[in-house]
Image (cartoon, rainbow, N blue to C red):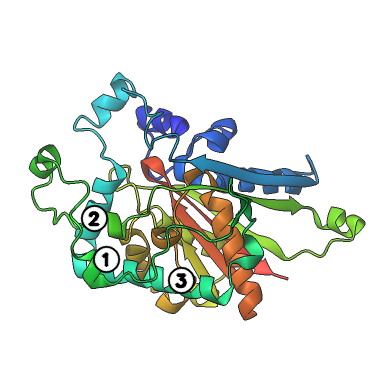
């Protein structure tokens, strides 16, 4: 977020993504492991190195969300956004309002995320991508803890809004306050990694490539709405790839909050059946620093399990940034 703050302070167009490479590796919030993956790939493409491991870890139980946020981003930033930006939960409320997504729609989507994730766990779909973690009692932890197979829209309807405050209600009097713990991604601990290398190196090592990167894109979008960046990022990456949305066999759109994938699907005309088919962050969790490579891994495993060819991954980031990637299964 540091590089994004500097760009906005300099009164850059919010639609322009402007971060120095070192910062985008460590300070792009939700995309913490998407951009190292991109930098690793770019380094391989440039010939700077032929093998890269993009990896990340997040312990939200130990490091509270927002604990590293500065008290002030500087006078010029504050002058540009005199009323201040908002937290991501309020941004999700703004997205829900703009796309007319009511509480019933959000809760139905979230319950379906849990249903899909529970079905994938039951079928063993996640087994190839989960590294068992040994527990102190000698048992092995092999299943994501946040999936609740019994979740229904009715059970979610009892939850209260998470982000309503008197201050925000006065600033945005027309908001419906529909974002709850049930239609948001839970606080999560997690880690993930992917191995990237050149075709030449893979051949020399006798390794079979599973997929190739086909195209990527990074964009900046409205800093107040914050969560809408995946929409222009997807349009850009599809143009870079020379593909249409219907050419893609699976879409992994990070479920930071239910309005994010729903607004994305509406704008792109995407097939709901292809959207997070094994569930998403609402059910599986969003361990910020590791989510990018987790999404990539799940996407590739789904392509292999179903015989699909192209996968598209996109996720929103703090400050209105977003990234998108298209891979092709080999």
- The residue positioned 56% from the left and 71% from the top of the image is 243
Disc 1 and disc 3: Cα gap in Å?
Answer: 19 Å
First of labels 1, 2 by sequence position: 1
Disc 1 and disc 2: Cα gap in Å?
Answer: 8 Å
Residue 147: % across, % down? 42, 63
**Closer to the observer: label 1 or label 3?**
3
Quarter residue 128 falls in: bottom right
First of labels 2, 3 by sequence position: 3
**Closer to the observer: label 2 or label 3?**
3
Given the current orientation, which residue lies at the most extreme top position? 75
Q: Which residue is mark 3?
A: 118
Number of other residues with Cα within 10 Å of mark 1, as a class: few under 14, some 14 to 19, many 20 or more: many
Disc 2 and disc 3: Cα gap in Å?
Answer: 23 Å
Number of dots carrying numbers: 3
Foreground of the two, 168 or 134: 134
Quarter residue 297 falls in: bottom right
Side (left or right) of 93 relative to 198? left
Q: Which residue is mark 2?
A: 179
Circles 1, 2 touching at the beta carbon (< 8 Å): yes
Q: Which residue is mark 1?
A: 106
Residue 294: % across, % down? 56, 55
Side (left or right) of 260 relative to 41? left
Answer whether residue 101 is visible to the viewer in this image.
no
């Amino acid at each position: 977020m540091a590089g994004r703050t500097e760009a906005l302070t300099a009164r850059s167009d919010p639609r322009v993504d402007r971060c120095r490479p070192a910062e985008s590796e460590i300070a792009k919030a939700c995309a913490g492991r998407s951009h190292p993956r991109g930098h690793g790939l770019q380094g391989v493409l440039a010939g700077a190195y032929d093998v890269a491991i993009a990896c990340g870890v997040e312990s939200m139980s130990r490091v509270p969300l927002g604990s590293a946020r500065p008290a002030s981003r500087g006078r010029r930033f504050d002058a540009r956004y005199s009323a201040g930006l908002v937290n991501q939960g309020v941004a999700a409320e703004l997205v829900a309002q703009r796309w007319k997504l009511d509480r019933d729609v959000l809760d139905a989507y979230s319950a379906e995320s849990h249903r899909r994730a529970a079905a994938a766990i039951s079928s063993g779909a996640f087994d190839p991508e989960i590294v068992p973690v040994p527990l102190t009692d000698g048992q092995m932890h092999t299943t994501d803890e946040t999936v609740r197979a019994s979740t229904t829209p009715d059970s979610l309807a009892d939850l209260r809004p998470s982000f309503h405050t008197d201050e925000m209600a006065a600033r945005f009097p027309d908001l419906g306050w529909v974002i709850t713990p049930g239609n948001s991604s839970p606080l999560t601990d997690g880690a993930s990694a992917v191995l990237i290398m050149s075709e030449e190196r893979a051949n020399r090592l006798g390794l079979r490539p599973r997929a190739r990167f086909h195209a990527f894109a990074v964009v900046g979008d409205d800093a107040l709405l914050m969560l809408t960046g995946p929409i222009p990022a997807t349009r850009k990456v599809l143009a870079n790839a020379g593909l249409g949305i219907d050419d893609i066999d699976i879409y992994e759109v990070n479920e930071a909050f239910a309005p994010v994938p729903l607004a994305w699907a509406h704008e792109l005309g995407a097939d709901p059946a292809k959207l997070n088919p094994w569930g998403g962050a609402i059910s599986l969790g969003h361990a910020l620093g590791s989510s990018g490579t987790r999404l990539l891994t799940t996407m590739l495993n789904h392509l292999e399990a179903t015989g699909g060819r192209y996968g598209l991954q996109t996720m929103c980031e703090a400050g209105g940034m977003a990234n998108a990637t298209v891979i092709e299964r080999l």
